[in-house]
Image: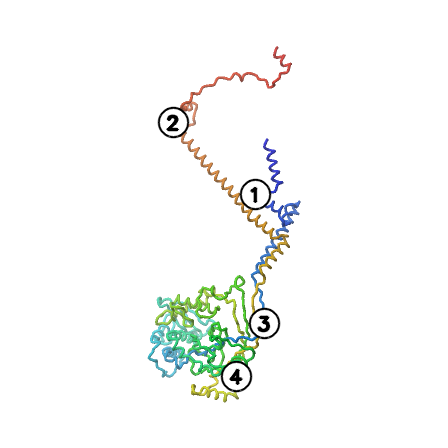
Amino acid sequence: AATAPGKKITARLKRTLPVRGPQAPTLSELMRWYCLNTNTHGCRRIVVSRGRLRRLLWIVLTLSAVGLILWQCAELLMNYYSASVSVTVQFQKLPFPAVTICNINPYKYSAMKEYLYELDKETKKALETFYGFSEGKSKVRRSVDDWNSTGSDFFEQIPLLKVEDFSRTATELHTGQKRKIEGSVFHKDSSIVNSGDSNDIIGFQLCDANNSSDCALYTFSSGVNAIQEWYKLHYMNIMAQIPLEIKEKLSYSAEDLLLTCFFDGLSCDKRHFTRFHHPLHGNCYTFNSGESGTILSTSTGGSEYGLQVVLYIDEADYNPFLVTSTGAKIMVHDQNEYPFIEDIGTEIETAAATSIGMHFTQSRKLSKPYSDCTETGADIPVENLYNKSYSLQICLHSCFQKAMVESCGCAQYAQPLPAGAEYCNYKKNPNWMYCYYRLHEKFVKEQLGCQQICKDACSFKEWALTTSIAQWPSVVSEDWMLRVLSWDKGQKLNKKLNKTDLANLMVFYKDLNERFISENPANTLVILLSNFGGQLGLWMSCSVVCVIEIVEVFFIDSLSIVLRRQWQRAKKWWSGRQQGRAAQATAGDVERQGHENPACIDEDLPTFTTALRLPLPQDSPLPRTPPPNYSTLRLETAFTEQLPDTLELGQH
């Protein structure tokens, strides 16, 4: 009863005095203290409002304001990583791009026949067997340097096949023998579905040299496509064995390809062209390559002030099995960009004047965190094999070539050689064709990881091309023009030119408008913080100090209270565990003492007789009955003074 007033005073002080920060014993008391002392009015109104309805209303309003703040701040944060696109148009003197020109036929067929003798012979036999096509015997004999001496054996290993049905049976076009098809079937031109006779489907089978049961049959619904694919497969194998110096001589020289040249109204010649050897297109020539340190420019738009060339195509010397079209391929590109003629080249036809008008555009994108592009390609884990500035195509081709070397042990012929590698050929790498097709299949299906590793370049230049074609030369001017051109080249050609051997090309700026497309950050850090402050002030009447207060209370103080409570619980649990162990130890001692007493051997409950038999402690007197305390029999008054009437009664 004496401590009750003290508890009441402590409880009253606890209710009136504010509990500060992590000193609050519970989270509810901490939240109450925060609501009473914070600068955000909504939280304070929740605590001081009277009535459940009004308090519930303030809770809803406060939570709605918090939700709106989170939503608006998330929108601001996402907009911070967005970019705005600006387009700038300038009128000025423009540098002229590099123009790369290649003949569609990579090598002169008359010079290549000795290297392709066995391959051409097998191709003609296949055509005769399947289509009844026959030719007279070729008069061209193989040279002493037999670059395909093992060709016949390899052609027998990978012959053209006629798929009679889909019962895994095929007929060799060369020998007429039937063989059983094992492994998977791949349709290389599945977009062309042949719904007719299955006998029209032809292809070839590739098997793993180390495992003959692991094979794949590549079928084509068109015989033309099948023969060309099969021919190119063996063609690349033969070309990979010929040294580069010999291949450059087998292809077209600048004098062979270029008949006339004009740039910006002035005459030009082969000195303005730079040769580079393309594996699939032979000798190609680049105008204004910039290797001499000078880049030509133009200050006037129009076809009269661009590049004008007349090309000699020489259709009669085309390889009939390798290419089926006539003309040239060109590509407009930057001086530091590698010309991927085989991918994005523009074809121009013979007996026509092809005019290509250009619009120049420079583009620049923002790198991380705005987009996933690369500035120089240094952050891409793929070696650049082309010795040119980074581009997505360079990365993809280099990545595939690296995977080719690692998986197949040799490099693919159509791409540059990595350091220490050599091109595949079936003399040294009899398994490379099967490996290449399997690897290319994975590359197309994006299973090699190249598409995931390679990124777009942040900066690039682009020339938008507009092509128009006109008949050239005209009927009235054909005779004299061909005579003059034949006279100019007569000493080398020794024959009259045909208009199907010529192509007229004009490349020029349509106008001198340079468009510059750039990305700029839509928001800066200052704008982002200002927008955050505006949202906090609008919905919660809060400032930066308020935000710091929220962090302190809801994260630091709340975490300290939770940790303190957990620590107290852990201490309480540990103390209880220690006390339990002590109690168990004491109980065990008592139990052992009882079992050691000889008087308590019997399992029956103790009686008065057995209790008398218990041994007495040593050095202790025997227990005796104490004498009675007679003073307790006396009557003691409860008062110090006795009344007079009771005193008289006592005397009597």
Residue position for label 1: 23
Evaluate if marks 3 and 2 touch, with contact meaning CB atoms under 8 Å apart: no
Residue position for label 3: 89
Asked whether 165 or 246 is in front, the reply is: 246
Residue type beneath disc 4: Gln
Q: Earlier in the sequence, mark 1 or mark 4?
A: 1
| C-alpha span from label 2 to label 1 | 60 Å
Residue position for label 4: 471
Residue type beneath disc 2: Pro
Q: Residue at x 52, y 71 (%)?
A: 461
| C-alpha span from label 1 to label 4 | 94 Å
Asked whether 49 or 259 is in front, the reply is: 259
Residue type beneath disc 1: Gln
Q: Secondary structure at mark 2?
A: helix
Evaluate if marks 2 and 1 touch, with contact meaning CB atoms under 8 Å apart: no
Residue 498 pos. (x, y %) = 47, 86
